[in-house]
Amino acid sequence: MSPDLPELLKPVKVEGADAAAFLHGQFTTDVIGLASGKSDLSAWCDAKGRVIATFILARQGEAFLLLLPDDIKEAFLKRLKMFVLRSDVVIADALEEDIPQWPPLPGTDGDLSETALIRQGIPLLHPETSGRFLPQELNLDDLDAISFTKGCYPGQEIIARLRYRGAVKRRLCHATTDNPARLQAGAALRTEAEDRHIGAVINSAITGEGQKLLAVLERPFIQSGCVVAEDFPDRPVWLTKETTGTG
């Protein structure tokens, strides 16, 4: 397997005569238009527009590779296979020989480590956060992980309506904390003064410069500078900036 793939992420292969059309009708990006040897950040949503999973999608000829967190992979595959029906589509774990080299995401340095993905503002969902957020709340619109022109996919009407309705109430932001205990995906965030949930941790990584986070937060509080994790009220979480969202 390519040495660029960290242990956190596991690959899945989707192939068959109908693979492109099938995935195009399920995912948020233009799968049919993805060129061979290229990759995109993409997502799969439920009928309410909530994101089930985010993942890196690469094309190899007429086959596709998905790279997603190991802890969500089995549930993701079980659900995706339910929609295959009579289509000529085979979904299975990818073999090492299927992945000679993972193509880098556009606009990134090709580093797929957890710390690098957090630094680049790329959110990956885990079981605790699956089905909780709309794509725009994860900044998938600004990450080019949503196509607003390709046609129908699960949740498409709700996602398109949010785009044209105006402001998104919650957005993905960068944060940091000196808490030595890693904040897990889904950990609730609140202000120091209010006992009310205003957001949640999406991804975290402990580095030599402290713990780095991606979190979804109500937008007025992103500018406040500091919140706390519900389980660690004495350890401030400093908000550094909204990742890329402007809508």
Image (cartoon, helix red, strand yellow):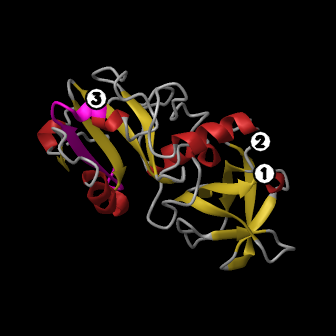
Q: Residue at x 44, y 65 (%)?
A: 127
Q: Is residue 15 magenta?
A: yes
195 displayed left or right of 56? right
User: Which amino acid type is marked by label 3?
Assistant: Arg
- Up-down relation of residue 139 to residue 9 (above or below): above
Q: As rendered, which of 235 and 44 lies closer to the eye? A: 44
123 displayed left or right of 95? right
User: Which amino acid type is marked by label 1?
Assistant: Arg
Q: As rendered, which of 78 and 11 lies closer to the eye? A: 78
Tell which circle, 1 or 2, labels the residue nearer the N-terminal end.
2
Q: Which mark is residue 219?
A: 1
Q: Which residue matches tag 2?
A: 167
Name the secondary structure under disc 3.
Answer: strand
Is mark 1 in CB contact (under 8 Å) with mark 2? Answer: yes
Name the secondary structure under disc 1.
Answer: helix
Q: Residue at x 60, y 47 (%)?
A: 138
Residue 128, image x and y in percent? 49, 67
Mark 1, mark 2: which one is toward the viewer? Answer: 2
Disc 1: CA contacts within 10 A as few (<14), some (14-19) or many (>=20):
some
Q: Which residue matches tag 3?
A: 59
Would you say residue 233 is visible in this rendering? yes
In space, the residues marked 1 and 2 are separated at their CA atoms by 10 Å
Name the secondary structure under disc 2.
Answer: loop
Which quadrant of the figure has residue 236?
A: bottom right
Q: Is residue 212 magenta?
A: no
- What segment is highlighted magenta in the picture? 6-21
In space, the residues marked 3 and 1 are separated at their CA atoms by 35 Å
Q: Quadrant of the C terminus?
A: top right
